[in-house]
Amino acid sequence: MRDLKWISVWSHQVAANLGHVFIPPGVDVPSPLELPPLTGFAHGVRSGPISVIDAQTILVTDFWYDGEGPAGYWWVTRGAHQSSQGLRLKDENDKPTPLRAYRGEAFLIRLPDTKTVYDFDWFGVYCEEFQVDFGHVRLPQNVRVPPSPKMLGMKPEVFQHLSIVFIIVF
């Protein structure tokens, strides 16, 4: 993105530039952040790299978990370590149920509407019943990631009927 000079919204229907924005040289553009894999402690929790796609979306790659934890959930916590004072997250299907077994899967986990990655220090799998950390990764606070579409007031259905192409010039 450092060589980006301008962005244009182009309409195929009318073959015209509907508008554009010049990007000043040296602008610091927020970008997704790749983190190390989860450090696993129990129930075979492990993963590939974890990516913070935007302020409310986390990409988990190559995730493994035996599904045997009695109340294992995706979990975020503020503080020195994962703890019961954290927040339970919904799974990749937006369900609030304990995690099932996973065998090398990749998916997105979304934070609740009012929370961002800047509200937490840790992301991982935590057992509510026994208050045990099954595996985690630290969320750094000194980074800039893009805002989520929700934070910008955008809804996915808005894009279903648009016939617009974004042209990016380097």
Image (cartoon, rainbow, N blue to C red):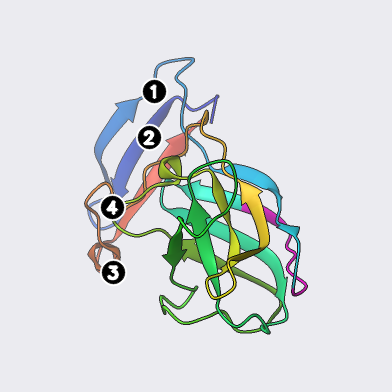
Of residues 133 and 18, the one nearer the viewer is 133
N-terminal-most mark, 3 or 1:
1
Farthest residue, direction front: 130
- At 37% from the left and 43% from the top, the residue drawn is 147
**Residue 77: x %, y % from top left:** 49, 51
Cα–Cα gap, marks 2 and 1: 8 Å
Labelled disc at residue 7: 2
Instruction: Name which of mark 4 and mark 1 comes first in the sequence.
Output: 1
Question: For the residue labelled by badge 2, is the local secondary structure a helix, a strand or a loop?
Answer: strand
Helix, strand or loop for disc 1: loop
Check residue 23 in the rendering and tell me which mark sits there, or answer none.
Answer: 1
Q: Secondary structure at mark 4?
A: loop
Amino acid on which the number 4 mark rests in the picture: Thr
Residue behind mark 4? 114
- Estimate how packed mark 4 is, as few (under 14), some (14 to 19) or many (20 or more) residues with alpha carbons within 10 Å: few
> Amino acid under label 1?
Ile
Instruction: Look at discs 4 and 2 and give the one toward the viewer.
Output: 4
Kindly check if marks 4 and 2 are in contact, taking CB atoms under 8 A apart as contact. Answer: no
Of residue 169 and residue 28, the one placed in the foreground of this image is 28
Q: Amino acid at mark 2?
A: Ile
Residue 42 image position (x, y, % from top left): 75, 69
Q: Is residue 29 above or below residue 71?
A: above
Q: Does the magenta stretch mainly form a helix, a strand or a loop?
A: loop
The boundaries of the magenta stretch are 43-50
Question: Does the segment drawn in magenta span residue 119?
Answer: no
Q: CA separation, marks 2 and 3? A: 21 Å
Q: Crowding at label 3, few (<14), some or many (≥20) Cα neighbours within 10 Å?
A: few
Task: Residue 89 in the image: state x and y as whole percent.
Answer: 44, 66
Task: Look at the numbered discs 2 and 1 and tell me whether their residues touch, using CB distance below 8 Å.
Answer: yes
